Image (cartoon, grey):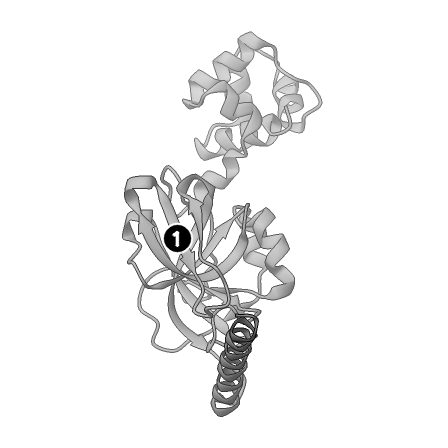
Amino acid sequence: MTNLASNLKYLRKSKKISQGDLAEEFEVARTTMGDYERGKTEPNLEMLIKIANKFEVDIDGLITKDLTHNELEIFRQERLRVLAISVDKENNENIELVDTKAEAGYLDSFQDPEYIRDLPKISFPNIPNGTFRGFEIRGDSMLPMESGSIVLCSYVEQIDQIKDGKTYVVVSEEQGLVYKRVTNKKDEAKLILTSDNELYVPYEIDYNNVSEIWQYYAHLSFSDAKSTFNYLLEEKLTDIQKKVNEIRNVVKKS
């Protein structure tokens, strides 16, 4: 019963019920109620039923879920949700940054409000209303977006909102955190994730494997655009030369 003690304390306080009044209603000593909330004593099944009925929660949720997160939840639906955001002194939403070092932790803790609060914050001017998050992009799968760029994205509440051909950060247990161009196959309940770099093969991911989706809004780059263009040009020429050599080899053998 890992979460029972904290859940009971949270539910009691959320209803503004004193420990003594709740103990009296349940016909137990106040010290017993205190022991429940401290995790020193576990209530029997009859008491669990009383607690669940009192606060209108199911017993499984009372025992296994962290109900204290409910007050921090911003969006909830069948497949996607964001549990928490943070705000500045003027009550404006902060923009949390998920850099490369934080990626592994984000995959494990993106639903943990305390983890989200501890992420570094960044600022972008003239941002519209909404929930935004910054993600550091690594690798060359989305060239000309160079490695190390920070992509600012807005939260997608429902998968139906995905627009084919637009770019998104997709968070999943299977693929981790990836930035791709997305096609929504609604009839098959799948997403096709495609890299702008043609060297990478597109792949599919089931709706059920998607934890979060963030749509591209803007980005910050930290390298010379001309250098990036030259790199792309060199890559393209190298690829062309490789294909020409392959054709020559085939001609020689025939």
Query: Visible in this render: residue 25?
Result: no
Which residue is drawn at the image coordinates 46% and 74% (left, top)? 123
Total number of numbered discs in the rendering: 1
Q: Residue furthest front?
A: 254
- On the image, the x and y values in percent for residue 22 come to 51, 20
Q: Residue furthest top?
A: 46
Residue at position x 48%, y 86% from top? 233
What residue is shown at x 50% (from left), y 25% (from top)?
61
Say which quadrant the N terminus sits in.
Answer: top right
Which is more toward the observer, 47 or 183? 183
Q: Tell me: residue 8, above or below residue 49.
A: below
Question: Where residue 79 sits in the image (x, y, percent)?
Answer: 40, 40
- Assess disc 1: are there few (<14), some (14-19) or many (≥20) residues with their C-alpha within 10 Å of its C-alpha: some
Asked which quadrant contains residue 117, the reply is: bottom right
Local secondary structure at mark 1: strand
Give the x, y percent position of residue 85.
46, 55
Disc 1: which residue: 192
The single residue placed furthest to the right in the displayed view is 40
- Say if residue 230 shows up in the picture: yes
- Residues 35 and 228: in front is 228
- The picture places residue 250, in percent across and down from the top left corner, at 53, 71
The residue lying toward the viewer, choosing from 238 and 60, is: 238
Say above or below: 134 vs 212: below
Residue 71 against residue 249 in the figure, above or below: above
Three-letter amino acid code at the position of disc 1 = Ile
- Quarter of the image where one finds residue 28: top right
Residue 102 lies left or right of residue 180; in this view the side is right
Horizontal arrangement in the rendering, residue 79 relative to residue 8 (left or right) = left
